[in-house]
Image: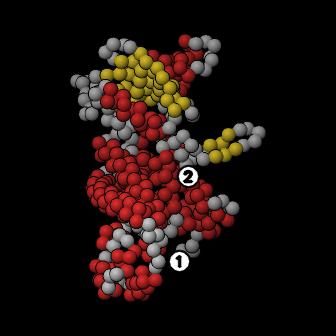
Amino acid sequence: MSEEHNSAGVREEPPFAAFLAIDWADKTHVWSLQVAATGQRERGELENRPELIEAWMNALLVRFAGQALAVGLEQSRGALLNMLSKYEQVVLYPIHPATAGRFRAALYPSGAKDDPRDAELLLEILTLHRRYLRRLDPDTVETRKLRFFVEQRRELVDRRTATSNRMTALLKQYYPQVLHWFENPTLPLVQDFLQRWPQLEMVQKVRPETLVQFFHEHNCRSQALIDERLRLIREAVPATRDAAVLDTSMVGVNWLLKDIALLREAIADLDHRIAEVARAHPDFVLFDALPGAGDVLVPRLIAALGTQRERFAGATQLQSFTGIGPVRVGRKTEWVHVRWACPKFVRQTFHEWAGHSIPHSAWAKAYYRQQIAKGNGHHSAVRSLAAKWIRIVYRCWVTRTPYDESIYLASLRKRNSPLAAALPVTP
């Protein structure tokens, strides 16, 4: 959606098809919608699950034929704000909690909290007082394209994993030896092997020279590994001779192999497209400097934060949005647990990157070891590390300054951080 200005230089609004207000909550969102053409209002509730929110928003965009939607929600709720920012047709109007609170006090002196009424209140502010709100336009085309691409890639990877698991289950029924001969059943080597010899008795009839040539053609040159595989093939005993199991399993594996090959091709195509978009992104240099990010995680980190720095009031809000920041429940007896209501893919992105950073960052390795020494498990330690990384990344992102490990290590030593003693001694 292009941005237009009037003669005074003020941004003009697009013609909105509907106005939508959402009262955010931990478990259930309450929404109120007004159709622009008719003034008709609708109300409803939506469970706070990212996949349900996405499906609901896509249905609205289809309903209004891709026309612009004005969405009002409280500014402090960064998670929902960021989830909706990837849609070109959505124009966000963050409403400060104090603004909503004053309107509530003026219109409802009792001060009673009522979610449906609060959604109506936000809708009133959006439709009647929109000119006083700060408008937050959709993120750049490059950023939104990157978000969709990385989400599509994750979906394809998950489908490949599910398909591989189905194939593994079939192989266990009639050809379990393949799972011992090869580490990863999704590799082209394994797929070509199964297409040529889909049954144990078939490969046992093949001359050793043919198998050696096959392995060489698939860049397997270790003679010790080849000899071990030849021995295992020669000594293997069929798991079953039941024709019903053999015939149906072979057919099933054949189709699953085709699915995996197609998914592998699609993922490779997306990798190429993602790399092109990411390298052209203005924030690529910032995220490419992060230790351990690599070709896969750099685009995902760019997509997670976007380009609009005003979306997050601080690093703490970013921690909450990503799901890395813990939730503390209770006063007398405090219960701390992982944040459940968050974009799972974004949380996974920061968790994976924090884990990858450990061998590439001296302070990250030292911090991780300290967490393990305290008795924390691996994932808990990585999550704590991710929380620290988010503070650093947020600062780099806001100031547009690439991360420099040497500067951060010097800062830790200057501040006499507990981590400084665990850092390697500089010459």
Which labelled disc corresponds to residue 37? none
- Residue under circle 1? 427
- Residue under circle 2? 387
Counting other residues with Cα less than 10 Å from the Cα at mark 1, is it few (<14), some (14-19), or many (20 or more)? few
What element does badge 2 sit on?
helix
List x then y, in percent, for residue 269. Answer: 27, 57
Q: What colour scheme has been applied to the protein in the rendered image?
A: secondary structure
Is residue 102 shown to the viewer in this render?
no
List x then y, in percent, for residue 56. Answer: 41, 32
Residue sitting at 55 percent across and 52 percent down? 387
Q: Left of 253 or right of it: where is 332? A: right
| Mark earlier in primary sequence (1, 2) | 2
What element does badge 1 sit on?
loop
List x then y, in percent, for residue 144. Answer: 33, 43
Q: Left of 143 or right of it: where is 229? A: right
Q: Left of 55 or right of it: where is 67? A: left
Q: CA distance from mark 1 to mark 2?
A: 30 Å
Query: What is the count of numbered marks?
Result: 2
Q: Amino acid at mark 2?
A: Ala
Whether residues under marks 1 and 2 lie with C-beta atoms below 8 angstroms apart, the answer is: no
Residue sitting at 49 percent across and 18 percent down? 120
